[in-house]
Image (tube, grey):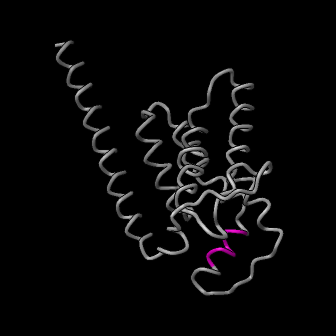
Amino acid sequence: MDTLTHLLIGLILAFAFFNDKQKVERIVTVCLSMAPDIFLSGFSFVKYCNLWFNCNIYPSWIWVPYAVSHSTITFVVLAAVCYIFLRRWFLPFILGWGSAHILIDLFTHSGQYGIRFLYPFSSIVFPGFGLWTEHIAAIPGIWVCLLVLFGIIVIVNDEKKQRKKSKKRKSRG
């Protein structure tokens, strides 16, 4: 998927799992949902250039950092490092990097963009359905759906806050 889609999914997960008091967790979740692509900002530029302008300018070295940042092995190692230092599972990392990025890309990439999920131990590519390469026209529709879902989550969270406030007022008065 594109970086904007990962951003929107990260926002949805951040607001669904963390409350207003957990702003740092929300920000970290959103940032980590884009991290594998942000680390490869040069790759992202080349990817957009190729898809929208048909430039065909892929340097051969670009696939190694792509495979490393999108590997489930890398994700597990980084999650273990977070666990060792924090002495607990770091939910923003699992939601952001794992769910909002690796898991989504695993099923939506195919062909040359396919995710080598066991890299560096294997170069087997998970056979996703190719949304990013074959169905690129669907991506703006996905953005709209994700924005609507985000709006629903924000409204539901706001209603929960309002109910809590009214319960506190009733118990005081």
| Residue 54 lies within the magenta run | no
User: In the rendered image, which quarter is residue 110 located in?
Assistant: bottom right
User: Which residue shows up at 41% across the image and 64% down it?
Assistant: 143
Image coordinates for residue 25, horizontal then vertical, percent: 55, 36
| Residue 47 lies within the magenta run | yes
Stretch in magenta: 43-48
Residue at the farthest right position: 61
Q: Is residue 20 left or right of residue 68?
A: left
User: In the rendered image, which quarter is residue 99 located in?
Assistant: top right
User: Which residue shows up at 75% across the image and 32% down it?
Assistant: 81
Q: Is residue 145 left or right of residue 69?
A: left
Eyeballing the image, is 119 above or below 58?
above
Quadrant in which the C terminus appears: top left
Image coordinates for residue 107, horizontal then vertical, percent: 53, 56
User: Which residue shows up at 60% across the image and 50% down it?
Assistant: 102
User: Which residue shows up at 75% across the image and 51% down it?
Assistant: 119
Eyeballing the image, is 153 above or below 165?
below
Quadrant in which the N terminus appears: bottom right
Eyeballing the image, is 85 above or below 151?
above
Image coordinates for residue 72, horizontal then vertical, percent: 67, 45
Eyeballing the image, is 160 above or below 145?
above
Prevailing secondary structure class for the magenta stretch in the rendered image: helix
